Structures are given as structure tokens and as C-alpha cells.
Amino acid sequence: QVQLVESGGGLVQPGGSLRLSCVASGSGFSINSMGWYRQAPGKERELVATIARSSWTIYADSVKGRFTISRDNAKNTVYLQMNSLKPEDTAVYYCNANAKSFTTVFDSWGQGTQVTVSS
């Protein structure tokens, strides 16, 4: 299985920036895509951004132009640079990895990191 550990969350003022990181560890798998999801209180978990091994990316409309996802395949690490943060970006952010082990494809999730945007 894939273990994911996130870091970089915290409290930031509106207009500020944060950078999230997520490191994948384990053995016996190859990672296809990695991404970030978020869940605000009382809301469903939603996609923020995802990046394929080829670096092809998808962003939620609400974060386009403000957030940038990137990955380091050699380090099995994915990053989320968040700029121009808004109060509505407040949520728990979860790292996701879609991986393959032999013929099995599966999703793994991190424990989540809190991002709070408030003055």
C-alpha cells in the first residue's frame, strides 16, 4: 500500500500563500496520478487539482489561476502552491494517490492538513 504524509497547512490571512507537500512511501507499486482534494465543514470532499505522471493537470474552476500543482516523480512527492487565498479556501486538504500494484489499481489518502484563511 501507499502511505501519504501531508505537510504545510496552517493559518494565513486572505491574499496570502501556502505551499502543501505530500510524500508517498511504501513499496510494490507505481503511482499514476497524484492530487489534492479538500473538504470544508458541512460540505462534500471536492477535487482541487490533480497531476498525472506525464504532468498533465486538472484544476477546479474555483482555484484556476491561483493554485499550482506540481510533482517530483523521483521523490514521489506532490506539491500544491496556493496563492491569493480566500476565506472560502478554508478546508481540510487531503492528498490522494492513484497507484497500481501488479494488476490492481487503487486510491490512497493522506490524513489531511488544515488550511484556514482568516484575518
Image (tube, rainbow, N blue to C red):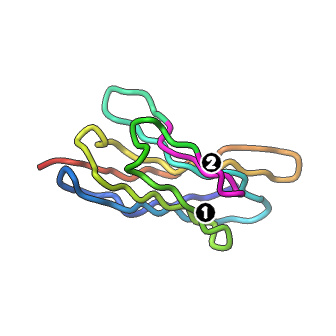
* First to last magenta residue range: 47-57
Write down the quadrant of residue 30 in the picture: bottom right
- Describe residue 110's horizontal placement relative to residue 93 as left or right: right
Residue appearing at x 56%, y 58% in the figure: 4
Vertical placement of 72 versus 6: above or below?
below
Q: Amino acid at mark 1?
A: Ala
Q: Disc 1 designates what residue?
A: 24
Tell me residue 64's x, y (percent): 43, 43
Q: Quick one: 16 or 104, which is closer to the camera? A: 16
Q: Residue furthest bottom?
A: 74
Image quarter where the N terminus lies is bottom right
Q: Quick one: 48 or 27, which is closer to the camera? A: 48
Residue appearing at x 60%, y 59% in the figure: 3
Residue appearing at x 58%, y 63% in the figure: 71
Q: Amino acid at mark 2?
A: Ser
Residue appearing at x 31%, y 50% in the figure: 115
Secondary element under disc 1, as helix, strand or loop, is: strand
How many numbered tags mark residues here? 2
- For marks 2 and 1, give the CA distance: 9 Å
Tell me residue 113's x, y (percent): 38, 53
Magenta stretch: includes residue 51: yes
Q: Quick one: 29 or 76, which is closer to the camera? A: 76
